[in-house]
Amino acid sequence: MSKRVLFVSKPVAPPWHDGSKNFVRDIATHLVRAQAIVMSTADAPSLGARVEIEPVYRGSGSYAPALAANARVASRLMFGEPNDIWHFVFAPNRASSTVASVAIHTRRMRGWHGKVVQTIASAPKECDPDFLFGDVVVAMSEHTRKRYLAAGADPALFRVIPPCAPPPARASKERQAAFRQEHDLGDSPVVVFPGDYEVSSGAETLARATKAIALKNPNVKIVFACRPKTARSAKAKARIEAILSTENVAEYTRHVGELDGLATLLSLASVVAFPVDDLYGKVDLPLVLLEALALGVPLVLASGGPLEEIAAARFVDPRDAEALAREVTALLDSSGELPEHGGALYLDRFRPGIVAAAYDDLYDSW
């Protein structure tokens, strides 16, 4: 008989712009042995015959669910169907971890013998072992596991299972042409930054590398596809635009904001540049990078963090604009070879079926 796994996460419903809930959707829909139950909204679309939807939430748009929504989740855990396994997917923090721990303890006091998986959806700034409560804790990268161990966490708790992303459909030539026209890209080679302006130094590093990239590739267009994540976004964007203006390279750049999916932009990209040194609030290996891998788009990433586990990329030190310009230029000139083909790495490690199978195995271990 299939084990019934309740995923405890943000609402698993559109819009699909949050890495942690996309991760739950993709795992739940690719499990073969376990039966997934996901927390969502009353009007959420079906995720297929093997995924049950519980309407725990009233809305789905917020990155951080409101206090009332969290209270509904706590009530579900305390009084709803116990299920065989609870699988929590969020960034550990004092409030959420306390609620989870109380719910687990209470249900076990009432005779529940289920198990608990805790996937660290995004690594917090401080890896506090006190916020870990799972029978098994899953880190999405070896880098995050090592951070927790350095902070004193029990190594026996941990497993590493990477994130996953479905392969995006490559946009048609017609759709690519329309996108180019809409954003005034001409027929230029396109370098994409799919990050944000305000959290890391990534956008600034690329802005400072733009002049050197454009000197070698005068037709290039560098596209900042940045979602405004915080109230600081507008001010941070203005700072990036000021750097580009001061260096007289604004003409080589485009700011397209948040797009309804990045498949078209990735389909026409020559390079994805993501020299991001702070992944706070993001999945350890951001899903857009896995989508780029699936499409075979070359990546230039920041070294020294979890991004190094995408072995098919080139790496530069964070904030090193000169090194970033060299690597991007080399790829635009096709003068270098990637250490490993990105598409092959994607198929081996980051497909939803591969990652879901690892979770099926974990659930079956009990």
Image (cartoon, rainbow, N blue to C red):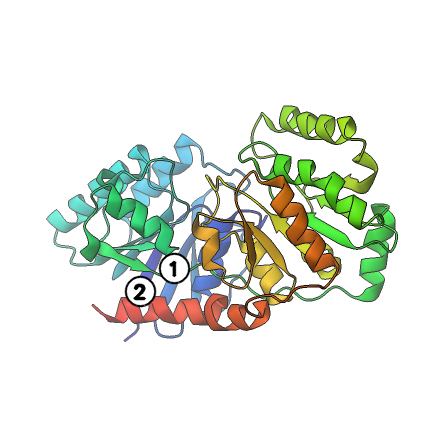
Position of residue 289 in the picture relative to residue 164 (left or right) = right
The quadrant where residue 73 appears: top left
What's under tag 1, amino acid-wise?
Ile
In this view, 151 is above or below 162: above
Residue 109: x and y in percent read 11, 47
Q: Quadrant of the C terminus?
A: bottom left
**Residue in the foreground of this view, choosing between 129 and 332:** 332
Residue at (32, 61) in percent of width and height: 5
Position of residue 162 in the picture relative to residue 310 (left or right) = left
The quadrant where residue 227 appears: top right
Q: Quadrant of the N terminus?
A: bottom left
Is the residue under label 2 in contact with that under label 1 (CB below 8 Å)?
A: yes
* Residue 266 visible, this orientation: no
Q: Which dot marks residue 4? A: 2
Q: Which dot marks residue 158? A: none
Residue at (64, 60) in percent of width and height: 298
Q: Earlier in the sequence, mark 1 or mark 2?
A: 2
**Residue in the foreground of this view, choosing between 29 and 107:** 29
In this view, 265 is above or below 354: above
Secondary structure beneath dot 1 equals strand
* Residue 342 visible, this orientation: yes
Residue 108: x and y in percent read 14, 50
Q: What residue did someone put label 1 on?
A: 37
Residue 144: x and y in percent read 35, 49
